[in-house]
Image (cartoon, rainbow, N blue to C red):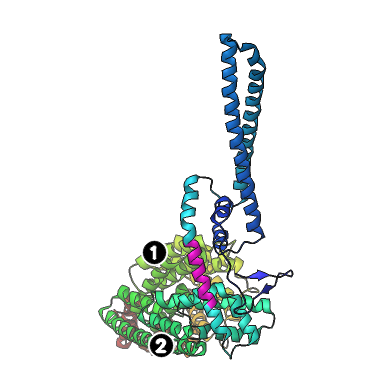
Amino acid sequence: MRSFDRQGQRVVPPPGGRSPQRPPPRWPLRIALRLMPEAALARLAEARLTGWGILLLCLGIASDLTQLFGNVAFWAAGASFALALVFLAALVLRTRFCQLCAVPFVVALVSTLVFAAVFGAQSLMAAQARGVIADTVPGVAAGQDWLKEILDRLDKIGEDTAATRQDAAEIRDSMATREDITGLEARLLAAMEDRLAAARASGITDAALIELARRISADVADPQQAFRELENAVEIAIRVQQEGRQGSNLGAFVDEVLARVASLAATGAYDEATVEIDAALAREAEEARLLDERREESRARSLRLLDAGLEQDLLRRDAESAAARLARMVEIERPEGASLFDHLRAVQDDWYERGRDRGVNLDLEVAIALARRMVDLATDADQRGAALNVLGNALQTLGMRETDPARLEDAVTAYRLALEEWTRGRVPLDWAMTQTNLGLALAGLGAREGDPARLEQAVAAYRLALEERTRKRVPLDWAATQNNLGNALQVLGTREAGTARLKEAIETYRLALEEWTRERVPLQWAMTQTNLGSALAELGEREAGTARLEQAVEAFRLALEERVRERVPLDWAATQNNLGLALQTLGTREADTEHLEQAVAAYRLALEEFTRETAPYYHEVASQNLARAQALLDERRKAP
């Protein structure tokens, strides 16, 4: 048991300096049991009566004396009451001694009342005292059954505590005799005598405890701080032993390492235990590396197999299955935490641009399927608007190549849904871009169906877009919208008797070319030159002379300098077809056959890319143009 000096520091008696003390008599303990916690019982059992114990002993003695006095008062009250009854009977029966019984009767009656009052007061005081004690001392029980149980356990508590202290004393004494322990280390270990037994019981050797004390004494000079550090270290050491025995539920490898570490730590081989942990961590890191390599190999194998499956899907012309494989590839390839939507959009853009520029419809079908997956994957208005817009683009591009207007109708629907997500008030430029795309789809339907209402809707959509797509704000986008507006005006102009719409279309194209220059955007410049040539050719057909037609031919030939077949085969074919139209019209106004022959050659070149499979609608249009031009040429050649 540790004692304290006046400053509160622990004072450790020298080894062997304590003399055995005789246990106290049992009756003081019986008196103090109601007040003492179990720890105090253990100390009393070892005959270590502190000031608290002496105080409790005195209270017990006073309690017994009070109870004895109460018992005497009780019996005296009873005797007095009995005498009072005797004297009362003598008075009632009028015996010979009745006159002598009056005074004793009164005395006996008064004595009965006095002794009864004293007994009642003693009982009340005892009850109050028990209540106060019960409220003041935690863990006190008032029942006699509890008291009997504690008394029965008292001997065992004393024996167990004595055994524990004897064990700790043996550890302390054995350590004190070692020559390799410094004074501070010895004091630290002696002060920990109540934890040494628990440490030894957990499997920790004396050498391990000495090693802990040595390390702490070398690092901490203050005795009180050193004691706290050692106390904490012993708790950790005990926990290490427990963990080594209990296991981790993380597999045999971890459990074996923890067991070996506990075995080393039990002997004080803390450095070796650390080496064991580091070796285990290194092995685990190697396992993780191998696992990562296997995971990377599996990833590479999966991507290769998916790519092989994609090729088969393309051979089977199964766009939906191809899109599913591409989406799976994106999931595998994207970095951890990256947006799946953004990566899928990049893949969709790639397939759309390839299908648009190379003229492969299957690629556009795959782009459509990917865009539909993006719509399903979108989580907010921005993503939904973007997905619906790119879906409309793919549908529109493919729809312009097909005779069936269903794709263009679907594109119009997709753009209008996109406008519900990309509102003008929230994202004005995105809204304007979608209005432009909607105008393209409507213009395509109007040109296909011959419905001026669709064309007027397209013109209205373009003009709305130009309210946000100003030349100062976004000059290139402004030029794109001007070009599209010119296309719609041109189609309307071809269906009207007057030339106002055609002239307005020509001016619109020339405005677009002010920003879409050949140096800045060569392909867009070439496209606008093609559109300008078409409007000039249409206007030239309605006017006398060949000036407008010659300007149209010049515009088409300029466009073909950038619209090369290897780069954009379908656009190249479209420009060849339009060039053939202008040359054909010129040929009808001249006596020779040069321009008609050039027109036939242009149509034939266009049909090399406008096949029935890739662009059936344009194939039909170019075929009809070629037939008419060839008929004119044959007729001209037959003429005398």
**Does the rendering let one see residue 15?**
yes
Q: Earlier in the sequence, mark 1 or mark 2?
A: 1
The numbered mark at residue 88 is: none
Q: Which residues are magenta?
A: 156-169
Q: Residues within 10 Å of mark 2 (few under 14, many from 20)?
A: many
Identify the residue at horizontal 37%, vertical 68% (top origin). Answer: 407
Could you tell me what secondary structure mostly forms the magenta stretch?
helix
**Does the rendering let one see residue 574?**
no
Which of these two is toward me, 139 or 444?
139
Judge whether 69 appears above or below 78 on screen.
below
Compared across the picture, whether 342 is left or right of 22 comes to left
The numbered mark at residue 595 is: 2
Amino acid residing under circle 2: His
Q: Is residue 259 magenta?
A: no
Q: Residues within 10 Å of mark 1 (few under 14, many from 20)?
A: some
**How far across and down, in percent of the image, does residue 188 sit?**
62, 79
**How far across and down, in percent of the image, does residue 241 sit?**
45, 78
Helix, strand or loop at label 2? It is: helix
Identify the residue at horizontal 42%, vertical 70% (top origin). Answer: 374
Q: Quadrant of residue 301?
A: bottom left
Q: Quadrant of the C terminus?
A: bottom left
The numbered mark at residue 409 is: 1
Cα–Cα gap, marks 1 and 2? 39 Å
Compared across the picture, whether 483 is left or right of 295 comes to right
- The residue mark sitting in front, 1 or 2, is 1
Return the residue found at the far top: 94
Which of these two is toward me, 572 or 251?
251
Which of these two is toward me, 133 or 87?
87
Amino acid residing under circle 1: Glu
Q: Quadrant of the N terminus?
A: bottom right
Which of these two is toward me, 210 or 362?
210
